[in-house]
Structure formats: structure tokens, C-alpha cells
Amino acid sequence: QVQLVESGGGLVQAGGSLRLSCIASGSIFSFNTMAWYRQAPGKQRDLVASITSGSTRTNYADSVKGRFTISRNNAKLTVYLQMNSLKPEDTAVYYCNQDRARPWDYWGQGTQVTVSS
């Protein structure tokens, strides 16, 4: 069964922090580079961060470098996104999936992050 369940979003003031979690099914998670994406209203879904299966390499969008940290727990099939120093422009629905996931692939419901100024 394919599964992606994101959680941890919410409303936070600028400068605050949130930690997102995503539980994935083994078919999606195992041995794959995982990633977080986000989609703001009226905009396309963009890659935020990715992490290789052994956590040996991470990659971040320029807009979040130094503020966000991606990590994973392979035993729990879970990927995390620690978000610090949040800005209003970080407001979006956040999704996790394999790296290079395509629009027609399976996606979870996402988790809403709203940052107030």
C-alpha cells in the first residue's frame, strides 16, 4: 500500500520554528532519496530539500539554506524537516516524496505551514 502522511504544520510567527514529519510506505521510502516540496497558492510545487538513503548527502533550495534541516529515520520510514527562522514567504503546503517525484506520481495530502509577519 502506497502511503505518504505529512504532519507538523501550523501557524507560527515570523522567526519561529516548526518540525515536519512524513511517514512513507516502504515502497516509496526504502533505498530512495527522499525530499520535501512546497506549494504556495497559485504557484508550482518546488523542491525544498532532499536527503539520500544513507543520509550521506543533503541538498537545499537556496531560499532555505541555513534555516531548514532535512533528516530521516530509516527504521521508522520517516523523513523530517526542521524549519527555523521562518519567514512569511515560507507559507505553503509542504509535501514529502521521493526525489524527482513527478506531478502524476502519488502524493499525500500535505501539511499547511502558515507564517505570519
Image (spheres, rainbow, N blue to C red):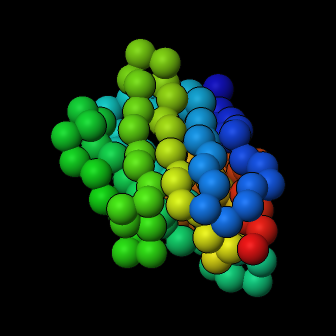
For the residue pair 33 and 112, the one nearer the viewer reads as: 112
Residue drawn at (28%, 51%) of the image: 58
For the residue pair 101 and 19, the one nearer the viewer reads as: 19
Residue 13 visible in the snapshot: yes
Residue drawn at (52%, 54%) of the image: 84
* Residue at far top of view: 75
Vertical position of residue 86 compared to residue 97: above or below: below
> In which quarter of the view is residue 72 placed?
top left
Which percent across, then down, holds residue 44?
A: 63, 79
- Counting labels gives 0
Q: Which quarter of the rendered picture does the N terminus lie within? A: top right
Drawn side of residue 11 relative to residue 56, left or right: right
Residue drawn at (62%, 70%) of the image: 87
Drawn side of residue 94 relative to residue 25, left or right: right
Which percent across, then down, holds residue 47?
A: 48, 66
Q: Which quarter of the rendered picture does the C terminus lie within? A: bottom right
Which percent across, then down, holds residue 26?
A: 49, 25
Which percent across, then down, holds residue 27?
A: 48, 30
Drawn side of residue 88 relative to residue 79, left or right: right
Vertical position of residue 5 compared to residue 14: above or below: above
Residue 112 visible in the snapshot: no
Residue drawn at (45%, 75%) of the image: 63
Vertical position of residue 8 compared to residue 94: above or below: above
* Residue at far left of view: 56
